């Protein structure tokens, strides 16, 4: 972070730094960052979603890899804290930079989402728009909503010289950040992504089905995913 901010502040004046401090308000979420982004095509900013974004010469947000980073406008808002939900439609690879407007940025590779708020446009000494002052915050947490809260999964099989469990993915209705609070021991690992959760079970050679709960949580809520694993057809016990 120290290195990044050092890069961002190259060429910034004391007035720029004073403006950044003044633009942080008590309503902004903890960890809010304020930056002045020029529209010269060279001012790439890492906002935490996995790849950098910039403002191009047409005064649009865009990602470093077209199509991998997506943006959506949520319209006029009072600030970052007012961006509380993630739309399922309206995403595009570029979107116009409008003062007083809130946005969400998503990276399909890292599956991360960040909030953006455009404070104001930056004008050059001789006139004309040279960029914008923005606030951003990552990660964004909204209520966890699973497409399925109860799943049934196979018991595993003998593969590649060993008895192995199964892999399963459950999609989220909307992207968000969260973590695993608890899980049964026979579920080997759970990976949390903003758009889905992926789990791996151990081989179930007991001859009987087993059921356990995975509890996922963030600051907004917690949800329980009930997992039933059937016995493996080639059980070894």
Image (cartoon, rainbow, N blue to C red):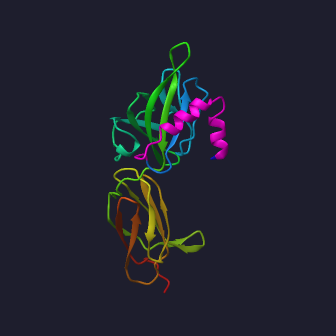
The front one of 69 and 208 is 69
Residue 89 in sight in this render:
yes
Q: Which residues are magenta?
A: 2-28
Q: Quadrant of residue 206?
A: bottom left
Decide if residue 212 is on the left or right side of residue 186.
left
Taking the spot 44% from the left edge, 33% from the top edge, the residue there is 118
Residue 65 in sight in this render:
no
Taking the spot 32% from the left edge, 64% from the top edge, the residue there is 149
Looking at the image, is 177 positioned above or below residue 160?
above
The front one of 75 and 13 is 13
Residue 217 lies within the magenta run: no
Looking at the image, is 34 positioned above or below residue 213?
above
Q: Position of residue 229 (x, y in %)?
A: 39, 74
Decide if residue 219 is on the left or right side of residue 41.
left
The front one of 133 and 69 is 133
Q: Position of residue 147 (x, y in %)?
A: 32, 57
Q: Position of residue 23 (x, y in %)?
A: 47, 37
Q: Quadrant of residue 221?
A: bottom left
Taking the spot 41% from the left edge, 83% from the top edge, the residue there is 207
Residue 9 lies within the magenta run: yes
Q: Position of residue 169 (x, y in %)?
A: 42, 60
Residue most extreme to the top: 126
């Amino acid at each position: 972070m120290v290195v990044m901010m050092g890069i961002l502040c190259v060429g910034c004046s004391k007035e720029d730094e004073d403006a950044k401090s003044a633009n942080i308000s008590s309503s902004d979420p903890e960890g809010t960052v304020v930056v002045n982004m020029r529209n010269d095509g060279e001012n790439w900013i890492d906002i935490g979603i996995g790849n950098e974004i910039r403002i191009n010469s047409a005064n649009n947000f865009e990602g470093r890899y077209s199509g991998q980073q997506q943006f959506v406008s949520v319209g006029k808002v009072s600030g970052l804290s007012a961006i509380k939900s993630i739309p399922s439609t309206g995403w595009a690879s570029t979107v116009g930079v409008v003062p007083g407007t809130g946005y969400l940025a998503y990276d399909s590779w890292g599956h991360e989402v960040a909030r953006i708020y455009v404070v104001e446009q930056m004008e050059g000494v001789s006139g004309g728009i040279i960029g914008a002052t923005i606030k951003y915050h990552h990660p964004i947490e909204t209520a966890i909503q699973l497409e399925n809260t109860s799943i049934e999964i196979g018991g595993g099989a003998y593969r590649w010289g060993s008895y192995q469990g199964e892999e399963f993915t459950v999609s989220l209705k909307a992207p968000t950040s969260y973590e695993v609070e608890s899980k049964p021991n026979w579920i080997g690992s759970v990976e949390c992504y903003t758009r889905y959760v992926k789990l791996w079970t151990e081989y179930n050679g007991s001859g009987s089905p087993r059921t356990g709960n995975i509890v996922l949580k963030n600051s907004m809520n917690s949800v329980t995913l009930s997992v039933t694993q059937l016995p493996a057809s080639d059980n070894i016990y």
